[in-house]
Amino acid sequence: MKRTILFVDDEPNILMGLKRMLRPMRDKWEMLFAGSGVEALKIMAGQHVDAVVSDMRMPGMDGPELLRRVMKEHPDTIRFALSGYSDQEMVGQSIAPTHQYLTKPCDEKQLILALEQALGARELVPNKGILDKIARIEHLPVLPEIYNRITAELAKGEPSPKEIGDMVAQDVGMSANILKLVNSAYFGLPRHIAAPQQAVIVLGVNVIRSVILSLHIFSSFENRVRQTFSLPMLWGHSMRVAAMARSIAAQERLGKDDADHAYIASLLHDVGKLLLDAHCSEECERIYEVVRAENRRVADVEAEQLGLTHAEVGAYLLGLWGLDPVVVAAVAHHHDTAPAQASKGTGQKDCPSVSDIVYFANILDHDIFVFHEHYARMAPAPARLAAIGGEGKYEAWKHGVLVLGLGGEDK
């Protein structure tokens, strides 16, 4: 079935350029074009639109106002903003209603990839009621400005670690948190890191971006009065799983891209729990009551009562934000009992997939660390064990993790 994409820009030449550029997508997309925000809303009132891509600066109804209207009136539509480097003030106004920013000028491949990935993320949430509920969230965590600026810098070519570090350093609170994390035992670095620029050089831009994103997401939920689980404990779990994924990737001599993907997916693998807890609180309370009373896995009870799991919800959010498909797939499948071929990454011969590493890093932390005496302890699924070569491989990974002291202490 074709997806319907609406492009909005007040400059006719821009719209004509988009029509020509995207002509090869006619078999997959129905493309609509509007010259103003008012025209766009009229089109959307008459037919369903899967995604809207709007310019920021338009007379009358500008991009931020249009996207806010779309969020309110058509919450299941994915919302993109096309912004130039002179649009920083308008970008700030459109933070809440925007799923992704695309920098102008945007080339054909970048635009198609971003739209295809975001549209594909919706398939991860089969429960339309939950999807609608998530889509209507006005305070869904948004990509922080630093993350967007780093992404824009990377799009220009080879980034300068100093420039990236300078961007991070402009946010004092974020810098302090990143340096605290980088110097913690989770990273196991041989020397103290004193400046954001050093952190970028040592850990790499992709890892720094994921830490920024994770800190931002967790801080978005830390002031909630009621929570069905401990936020500090979930944060600690996410950090340990990410560190374990780094350990496994090092043991298996994975390439840098796959190792980074495994780390990022592990750090973000449980963000769906935050979304469900914040916006489906009554359902979550019932789920955790059953989990504790019957000593069952959270994901199993979620699937039973909601028709989906926090893994799918988290992957949906990360997909809308445009994270790498390998990361999104690994998050989506981190509780699956069968291996997920979609997250193979670069496919190094005889190496485990990114999905496998995230799955087993999560299992290892639950195996080593007791979260709650009434939570079921996780055991590796036979099919997942077979995919990595058997239980001996899992035990070797566990030994490597324990040697580094990454599992915390049992309570």
Image (spheres, rainbow, N blue to C red):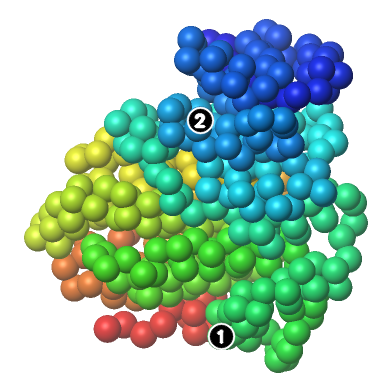
Residue 2 x %, y %: 57, 11
Q: Nearer the viewer, residue 350 or 182?
A: 182
Distance Cα–Cα, label 1 vs label 2: 45 Å
Per the rendering, the mark at residue 185 is 1
Element under label 1? loop
Residue 155 x %, y %: 83, 48
Q: Residue type at mark 2? A: Val
Residue 7 x %, y %: 68, 22
Quadrant for the C terminus, please: bottom left
Mark sitting earlier along the chain (1/2): 2
Per the rendering, the mark at residue 70 is 2
Asked whether, in this view, residue 82 is left or right of residue 290, the answer is right
User: Is 365 situated above or below 57?
Assistant: below
**Cβ–Cβ below 8 Å for labels 1 and 2?**
no
Q: Residue type at mark 1? A: Ala
Residue 323 x %, y %: 62, 47
